Amino acid sequence: IYKLGALIEGVAAEHLLKDFLLVPTLNTFMEQLVPLGLDFFPILVVDLLHEFELRVFKSVFKHFLRLLYAIDHESVT
């Protein structure tokens, strides 16, 4: 957006950022790391509890434990 010179509240910015739920802000990471060719967004840890409700997360976690137990019951103690 900044390299294109697009307006922050413009259609182009909304089109580029909408799919990823990003906001057009400058920060220290961007200013220092992007010139070095490092895109820091893939490094960020995804917080699954923001994606799932707690009860859904617990169910998925229990299912993963059951799968691990079925594959190798000694790995789950």
Image: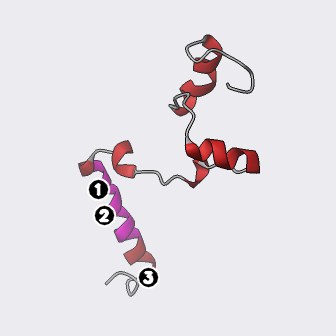
| Residue at mark 2 | 62
Near-viewer residue (70 or 62): 62
Q: How far apart are marks 3 and 2 (CA)?
A: 15 Å
Q: Earlier in the sequence, mark 3 or mark 2?
A: 2
Q: Which element type, helix, strand or loop, lies under badge 2?
A: helix
Amino acid of disc 2: Lys
- Examine the residues drawn in magenta and state their main secondary structure: helix
Tell me which segment is drawn in magenta.
56-67
Task: Provide residue 50's location: percent of width, then percent of height.
Answer: 35, 44
Mark 1 touches mark 2? (CB < 8 Å)? yes
Amino acid of disc 1: Ser
Kindly identify the residue that appears in the image at 48 percent across and 54 percent down. 45
Q: Which element type, helix, strand or loop, lies under badge 3?
A: loop
| Residue at mark 3 | 72
Classed neighbour count for the residue bearing mark 2: other residues with Cα under 10 Å, few (<14), some (14–19), many (≥20): few
The part of the image, by quadrant, that contains residue 4 is: top right
| Residue at mark 1 | 59
